[in-house]
Image: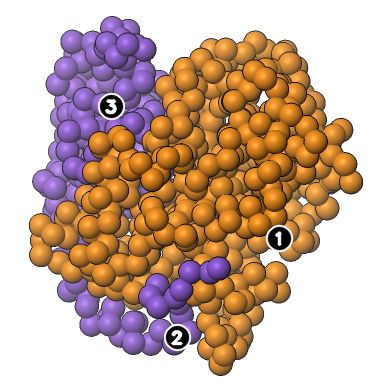
Chain colours: A orange, B purple
C-alpha cells in the first residue's frame, strides 16, 4: 500500500525532475506579462539562450495598459516601451501573445482559465503573486520573481523548497448575500497576513465543493494575502464541466485520458496536513477592510476597531499607522464611511459572475452623484459575454463607466489612478498604502457590496438590498 | 551577481511589521524594462512628500545613515506582490542584507537570486538589534559561512536554506547550473502525458 498523500503532494511528486532540498520541478504552463518579464528576456539575450518551450508559454498584456481609448495608442511612454518590448520578445521567441488588439486579451489569471489552459494537476508559474488563482483547478500554481522567470524560460524548470501543507476546512453553507470574497476575507482575518507562510493551502469541505469555479478562483487568488505559497482546491465535476470545450482543453480520447487523471487528484483519506484551520461559513457576513492590509477587515455591520483591541504590540502599532493613513477614527460605524470611487474588476473579482452580482444590485438604481464608478472586466472575453447579456447597459444606465480589460486600478500602473486622499470601495485584493495611487484609501469588498456602496455613496449591508 | 560571504556595516532600523513590496518599491517605478536604477525609489512614498521632495523625517534620508549596509525590520517583510524590483531597490540603495523575524516566501527567494542576504532571527533578537540601530554608528557583522550575526552584546546563530546559502556564496548562474541536469529534464519532458495543454494552435472563442 502506498503512503496516503494530499492533493498538493500528488501534484508536487508528478513534477519532480530532481527530488532533493530544494527540488527541481517541471513547469507545465508559464504565463508571462509585460511588467515582470522584460529583464528576463534581456537576460536570455545577454547569455545567448533560447526559450526552451515556447509551446508551454503564453503571454498577455494587462498591468500597464489603458482601459479607454486604446485605438489612440498608449500615451505613457514608459508603458508603451514595456508593451512594445513584450510584443517584440514574444515575436522573437515564438510565444503566443494575447496582445492589445486580441479578443482574448485580459488579466493573466483570468485568461488562462478562460482559454482552458489552466487544468487540474498542472504546475503553473508566472511572475505575479496572484498566480495562486489557478490552484482553483487543482493545479499547483505560484508566483515567481524575474530571475526565476528567466530560469523557467530557459529550462522550463524551477527550484523550490518543499512547502508544508495546510488544510482550510470550510463547513456550512454561505449565507444569502455573503460571497466568496467575504469567505476569503474571513479566512485571512482568522489566519492573518502571514498565517499561510511557507505553506500550500488546500481549501476543503462541503462549502468549497459547492462553489462555482469563479468563486473558487476568488478564494485561491487571495491565498497570497494570507502569506501562502499557493492555494488549491481538488478538481471535481464542477471543474471538469468548466474546462470542457474551451479552446485549449483536450478533446476526444485525450479528453477521456485527462479526466481519468484529474479524478485521481484528491487528498487521500488518511493523508495528514501540517496545519489545520476550521471555518464556519454559516457565520460569515459581508466584510469591509478598514486598514492597509487584507487582514484588517470587519463585518459591514461593525465599526472601525481601536488599536487597543489588539493584544500583539506589533499589530497595535500597525493599526495606529493604518488608521492615520486611512483617516479613520476608532468606533466609526462602517456604514458611515463615505466613498469617492468604486472599482469593480481585477483578477480577484473581474469575472462574469462578479459582474452579474454587481449588475443585479444596480438594476434600476443610480450611482450616487459624488461617486466615480468604474467597471473593468477581467478580460475582453468577459466583456463580450457581459455585453451579450446586456450587463453593460445596466452598468452604464446606473452611471458606471464601462471599460476595456486589464489590471487597472487594482495596482494603478495605468492611467486609472485613485487621487490622494480619496476613498475607493474596491473589489481587488490589496488595500496596501498607495496601492491604488499615492495617498489613495482602499476598502476591499465583494462586487455586490461595491455596487451597493456606489449607489448609497457609503458602505451599506447589501443583504438588506438584494432582491431574490 | 557577486558572491556574498560576510557583511559588516551599519544598520538602519525600520520597526514595522508586514512591510509589503508595494511600500518597498511603488508601482509607478515598475514600468522600466531595465534591471538597475531602482535604488533611488526605495520606500518612495514613505521617503518623499506629496511634491516629491525627500522627507527629512524618514530614516533612509538621514545623512547619518548614508553608507549603511543592513536593514533591520519587523516580521513578514516583503509580503504581497512578487516584484523582484523590491530586492533590486534594496540592494541598489546600498543594503547588502536584511534582518527580520520572518521574510515573505517570494521575497526570500527573490533576494537570494539577486545576492541580497536575508537573515531571519527571533523577534526578541531583532528587537535588540533595532534598539542598537537607533545609534547610526552601531555596526553588525553577518557571517554567512558560520551563519552568525554579531553586534554589541549579541551573538546569534541563524538558519538559512542551504540552496540560498550556496547561491549567495558562489554567486552562481543558476540557469547554467540547472542545464547541467539537461538529461533529467529531457527525460521528464519525454514522459509527460500527451493530453497536457500547449499554447499553440487554438483559435479565439467566439
Q: CA distance from mark 3 to mark 2?
A: 46 Å
Identified at 18% across, 42% down, the residue is B34
Image position of A190 with respect to B194: above or below: above
Q: Position of residue B81 (x, y in %)?
A: 42, 41
Can the viewer see residue A233 in this picture?
Answer: yes
Residue pointed to by mark 3: B42
Q: Nearer the viewer, residue A279 or A54?
A: A54
- Front of the two marks 1 and 2: 1
Q: Is residue A71 above or below residue A30?
A: above
Q: Which residue is at 36% across, 33% downward?
A: B27
- Residue on which disc 2 sits: B193
- Mark 3 or 2, nearer chain start: 3
Instruction: Give whichever of A127, B185 is nearer the camera.
Output: A127
In this image, A167 relative to B64: left or right? Answer: right
The single residue placed furthest to the bottom in the displayed view is: A253
Left or right: B25 as drawn, with respect to A304: left
Residue at x-position 14% and y-position 52%: B171
Q: Residues within 10 Å of mark 2 (few under 14, many from 20)?
A: few
> How many discs mark residues in the rendered view?
3
Q: Which residue is mark 1?
A: A212
Is there one chain holding both mark 3 and mark 2? yes
Label 3 secondary element: loop
- Give the residue furthest to the front: A72
* Whether label 3 touches label 1, CB < 8 Å: no
Amino acid at each position: 500500500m502506498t503512503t496516503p498523500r494530499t492533493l498538493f503532494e500528488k501534484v508536487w511528486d508528478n513534477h519532480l525532475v530532481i527530488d532533493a532540498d530544494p527540488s527541481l520541478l517541471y513547469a507545465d504552463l508559464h504565463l508571462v506579462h509585460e511588467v515582470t518579464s522584460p529583464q528576463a528576456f534581456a537576460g536570455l539575450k545577454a547569455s545567448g539562450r533560447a526559450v526552451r518551450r515556447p509551446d508551454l508559454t503564453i503571454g498577455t498584456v494587462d498591468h500597464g495598459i489603458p482601459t479607454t481609448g486604446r485605438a489612440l495608442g498608449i500615451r505613457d511612454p514608459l508603458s508603451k516601451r514595456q508593451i512594445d518590448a513584450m510584443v517584440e520578445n514574444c515575436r522573437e521567441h515564438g510565444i503566443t501573445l494575447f496582445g492589445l488588439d486580441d479578443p482574448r486579451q485580459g488579466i493573466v489569471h483570468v485568461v488562462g482559465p478562460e482559454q482552458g489552459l489552466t487544468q487540474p494537476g498542472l504546475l503553473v508559474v508566472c511572475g505575479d503573486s496572484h498566480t495562486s488563482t489557478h490552484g482553483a483547478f487543482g493545479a499547483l500554481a505560484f508566483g515567481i520573481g524575474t530571475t526565476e522567470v528567466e530560469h523557467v524560460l530557459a529550462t522550463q524548470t524551477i527550484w523550490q523548497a518543499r512547502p508544508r501543507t495546510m488544510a482550510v476546512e470550510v463547513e456550512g453553507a454561505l449565507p444569502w448575500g455573503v460571497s466568496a470574497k467575504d469567505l476569503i476575507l474571513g479566512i485571512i482575518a482568522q489566519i492573518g497576513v502571514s498565517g499561510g507562510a511557507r505553506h500550500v493551502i488546500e481549501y476543503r469541505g462541503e462549502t468549497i465543493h459547492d462553489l462555482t469555479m469563479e468563486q473558487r478562483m476568488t478564494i485561491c487568488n487571495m491565498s497570497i494575502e494570507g502569506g501562502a505559497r499557493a492555494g488549491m482546491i481538488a478538481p471535481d465535476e464542477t471543474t471538469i464541466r468548466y474546462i470542457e470545450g474551451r479552446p485549449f482543453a483536450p478533446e476526444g480520447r485525450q479528453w477521456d485520458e485527462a479526466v481519468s487523471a484529474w479524478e485521481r487528484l484528491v487528498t487521500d483519506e488518511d493523508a495528514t496536513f501540517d496545519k489545520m484551520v476550521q471555518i464556519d461559513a454559516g457565520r460569515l457576513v459581508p466584510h469591509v477592510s478598514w486598514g492597509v492590509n487584507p487582514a484588517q477587515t470587519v463585518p459591514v455591520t461593525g465599526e472601525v476597531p481601536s488599536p487597543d483591541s489588539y493584544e500583539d504590540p506589533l499589530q497595535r502599532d500597525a493599526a495606529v499607522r493604518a488608521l492615520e493613513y486611512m483617516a479613520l477614527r476608532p468606533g466609526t460605524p462602517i456604514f458611515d464611511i463615505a466613498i469617492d470611487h468604486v472599482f469593480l474588476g481585477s483578477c480577484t473579482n473581474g469575472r462574469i459572475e462578479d459582474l452579474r452580482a454587481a449588475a443585479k444590485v444596480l438594476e434600476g438604481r443610480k450611482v450616487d452623484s459624488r461617486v466615480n464608478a468604474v467597471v473593468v472586466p477581467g478580460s475582453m472575453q468577459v466583456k463580450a459575454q457581459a455585453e451579450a447579456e446586456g450587463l453593460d447597459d445596466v452598468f452604464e444606465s446606473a452611471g458606471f463607466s464601462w471599460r476595456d480589460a486589464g489590471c487597472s486600478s487594482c495596482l494603478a500602473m495605468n492611467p486609472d489612478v485613485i487621487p490622494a486622499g480619496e476613498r475607493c470601495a474596491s473589489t481587488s485584493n490589496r488595500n496596501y498604502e498607495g496601492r491604488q495611487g499615492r495617498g489613495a484609501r482602499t476598502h476591499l469588498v465583494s462586487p455586490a457590496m461595491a455596487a451597493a456602496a456606489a449607489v448609497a455613496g457609503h458602505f451599506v449591508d447589501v443583504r438588506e438590498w438584494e432582491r431574490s | 551577481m557577486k558572491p556574498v560571504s560576510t557583511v559588516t556595516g551599519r544598520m538602519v532600523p525600520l520597526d514595522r511589521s508586514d512591510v509589503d513590496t508595494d511600500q518597498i518599491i511603488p508601482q509607478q517605478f515598475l514600468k522600466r524594462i531595465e534591471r538597475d536604477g531602482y535604488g533611488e525609489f526605495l520606500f518612495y512614498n514613505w521617503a518623499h512628500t506629496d511634491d516629491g521632495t525627500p522627507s527629512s523625517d524618514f530614516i533612509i534620508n538621514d545623512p547619518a545613515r548614508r553608507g549603511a549596509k543592513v536593514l533591520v525590520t519587523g516580521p513578514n517583510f516583503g509580503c504581497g506582490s512578487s516584484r523582484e524590483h523590491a530586492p533590486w531597490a534594496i540592494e541598489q540603495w546600498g543594503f547588502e542584507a536584511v534582518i527580520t523575524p520572518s521574510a515573505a516566501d517570494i521575497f526570500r527567494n527573490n533576494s537570494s537570486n539577486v545576492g541580497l542576504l536575508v537573515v531571519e532571527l527571533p523577534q526578541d533578537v531583532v528587537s535588540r538589534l533595532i534598539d542598537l540601530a537607533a545609534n547610526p554608528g552601531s555596526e553588525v557583522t553577518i557571517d554567512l559561512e558560520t551563519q552568525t550575526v554579531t553586534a554589541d552584546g549579541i551573538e546569534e546563530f541563524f538558519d538559512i536554506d542551504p540552496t540560498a546559502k550556496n547561491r549567495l556564496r558562489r554567486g552562481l548562474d543558476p540557469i547554467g547550473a540547472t542545464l547541467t541536469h539537461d538529461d533529467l529534464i529531457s527525460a521528464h519532458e519525454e514522459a509527460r502525458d500527451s493530453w497536457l495543454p500547449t499554447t499553440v494552435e487554438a483559435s479565439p472563442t467566439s
